Image (cartoon, rainbow, N blue to C red):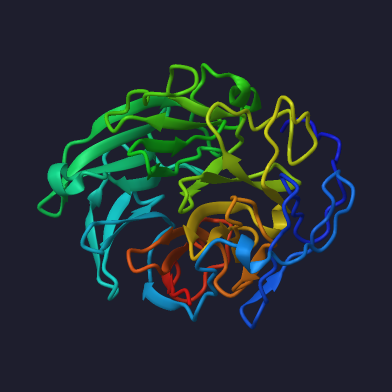
Amino acid sequence: MPAMKPRSYAAFGVALVLAGSCALSGCSSGSSGSSGTATGGGREGGGTPAPLPSASAQPGRARPGAPRTVATGLSVPWAIAFLPGGDALVTERDSARLLRVTSFGQVTVIGKVPGVEASGEGGLLGVTVGPSFLRDRYVYVYFSAGSDNRIARFVYSGGRIGPLQNLVTGIPHAGNHNGGRLAFGPDGMLYASTGESGQPPLAQDRDSLGGKILRLRPDGSPAPGNPFGTRVYTYGHRNVQGMAWDGAGRMFASEFGQDRFDEVNRIVKGRNYGWPDVEGFAGDEKRFTAPLLTWTTDEASPSGLAFAGGSLWVAGLRGERLWQVPLSRGGSAGRPIARFSGRYGRLRAVVTAPDGSLWISTSNQDGRGSPHSGDDKILEVPLR
């Protein structure tokens, strides 16, 4: 474990800090949520932020409705991706099974992804459906093999997993910090988050695939316009497990901190996000990009990330809650609101469904949770 760095500020409750000079948003908490307490983050004038003026908020500011259980009895469902017809593909980390789940709760085992060797936090992790799926039937997966993490694709046809085509190999692998999220961006390129596999210096090594966000062509080669002529899009990450884009195409990522501060970052091409030299706001902002906001690790440990209804939605593992982060029209963060605190245990994935609702997976069977009856589950949360 790397040496602790000087604390950049005293954290109480959720530690939210502006990455710019914009005002922060505060939605009413209602019965299903409570707002966090902001602190100064090493800057003068911290405190509870004021609500965003309506003219500054993104359209469609939403409140979550009552969750509905879609499926039960799953084993560490790690990622969810929707097929064009509305059914979802779901990965199970430890079993290496890929499931197809309908909105009515029918669960079908498509098969096991070959080559997966699950241990610790590794296993079958991310899944995404290619943007040209109706033509080529490609599904993409991120998984842990014996000595590395890999990104592969296969043709999903006849309800079966076709032969795997490895696109990226040699991503550092360990018992933890494996990253693993996959998503196609608005530009049609494939984005992948990788962890530094418990070797913090890899995050600052631009020649390593560890501790990065990668941007790839659908065939796994470096995407055009990447900042260093390689697959690397951004670096200085510890363990990113969530990626999302707002309606304006701005990219955001959720990232596990070490012992003090988890982060949501605005992702910009070529930027250095500081790990292991910086955790939270403690660093030189001429060299490192400051987070959009931070939490203490007991309140978040953020995994999945989605955008819907004018807000980012962050799934909390250790925090056992769904965080709603309203965004301004300029992409600045508002006051985060905790939803469903402690009600469902550890939350892993959160994605926006085709109908605009959120699908969320629990992760209480992952060895760190307290399983509830029916765990693990997939929940549907309508937005209103």
Q: Tell me, yes or no, if residue 320 can be seen here.
A: no
Viewer-proximal residue, 68 or 97? 68
| Horizontal arrangement in the rendering, residue 134 relative to residue 232 (left or right) | left
272 in relation to 88, above or below: above
Front-most of residues 23 and 224: 23
Q: Is residue 65 shown above or below 126?
A: below
Of 12 and 190, nearer the camera is 190
Q: Position of residue 10 (x, y in %)?
A: 87, 50
Q: Provide residue 102's location: percent of width, then percent of height.
A: 26, 68
- Corner quadrant of residue 189: top left
Q: Quadrant of residue 74?
A: bottom left
From the top left corner, tell me how far across and down residue 139 is, in percent. 25, 44
- Which residue is rendered at x = 47% and y = 49% of the image? 248
Q: Is residue 111 above or below residue 88?
A: above
- Spot occupied by residue 300 in the image (x, y as percentages of width and height): 65, 57
Give the image quarter of residue 341: bottom right
* Residue 216 can be seen in this image: yes
Q: Residue at x 32, y 64 (%)?
A: 354
User: Residue 206 vs residue 93: left or right?
Assistant: right
